[in-house]
Image (spheres, grey):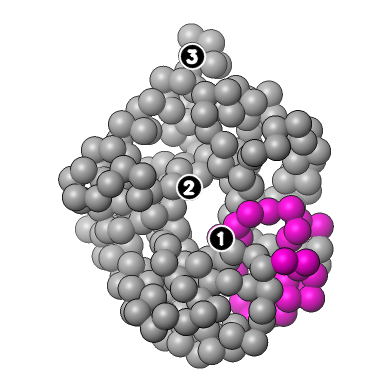
Amino acid sequence: MSTKELLNKNFQAIQTQIQEATSSAERPADSVKLVAVTKTVPTDTMRDLFALGMKTFGENRTDVLVKKQAELADLTDIEWHFIGNLQSRQVKSIINSIDYLHSLDRLSLAKEIQKRAEDTVKCFVQVNVSGETSKSGFEPSELESTLEQLASYDKIQVIGLMTMAPIDATEAELHQYFKQLKELQTIIAAQKLTHAPCTDVSMGMSQDYPIAIAEGATFIRVGSAFFQE
């Protein structure tokens, strides 16, 4: 099977799973945005995916993102998502060339974005719902005060919350973590904050996105499911 045939087969399988998961959750299929995580994928493969209709790509390294954006500059309607840990010193190199940041995980990063951004940046606040010490992000108990402080940064719009579940989480634990993030998002959205409408939830990856959809994900970040045999 050629690379293009494999991509097409996997893309269709992912779309089918999204349709099944949204249908089971009694949600419209278009209530979930699929982000193709292409961090280990060459631009030729990304072009093949683009030709199949995939136009939303997620990268987790600033140097790779900058390189790929240059190589794919002719594909003007790509939507770029930065999904990895963003160091403050790297903000200036990408903040004005991405459409979404999924990893606003500390106030010092918000300060640097405020300093470097030319326009408002759509951001997901990263929440460590699992309490893993290896994970970055705000604790759920910190969210209220964090959002109060972010109100003074007019270059940041908090469109939602993001989390990453532990790699070894059980199915029951995944439901618990994703449900908790959705509940936090709902509480914030109800406050109708101008700087933090918080209408979205970014959660779920290749191994668990159907569960994330069941619990209310509106953005899913899928990588290996696109490219595996």
Where disc 2 sits, the SS reads strand
Q: Amino acid at mark 1?
A: His
Residue 74 appears in which quarter of the rendering? top right
Looking at the image, residue 226 lies above or below residue 203: above
Q: Position of residue 65 (x, y in %)?
A: 72, 46
Residue 147 in sight here: yes
Judged from the image, the secondary structure of the residue bearing numbered disc 3 is helix
Identify whether 42 is placed above or below 190. above
Q: Are marks 1 and 2 in contact (CB under 8 Å)?
A: yes
In magenta stretch: residue 107: yes
State which region is magenta.
93-119
Would residue 138 be seen by someone viewing this image from the given angle?
no
Classify 187 as above or below 26: below
Q: Are marks 1 and 3 in contact (CB under 8 Å)?
A: no
Residue 96 position by quadrant: bottom right
- Give the Cα distance between marks 1 and 2: 10 Å
Task: Determine the secondary structure under disc 1.
Answer: strand
**Residue hosting label 3:** 5
Instruction: From the viewer's perspective, tell me whether residue 87 is left or right of residue 189.
Output: right
Q: CA distance from mark 1 to mark 3?
A: 30 Å
Q: How many marks?
A: 3
Taking depth in this image into account, of 148 and 181 the one nearest to the observer is: 148
Which residue carries the number 2 mark?
221
The disc placed on residue 79 is none
Residue 29 quadrant:
top left
Q: CA distance from mark 3 to mark 2?
A: 22 Å
Mark 3 residue type: Glu
Image point (55%, 16%), residue name: 3
Three-letter amino acid code at disc 2?
Arg
156 over 3 or under it: above or below:
below
Q: Quadrant of the C terminus?
A: top left
Residue ID for mark 1? 102
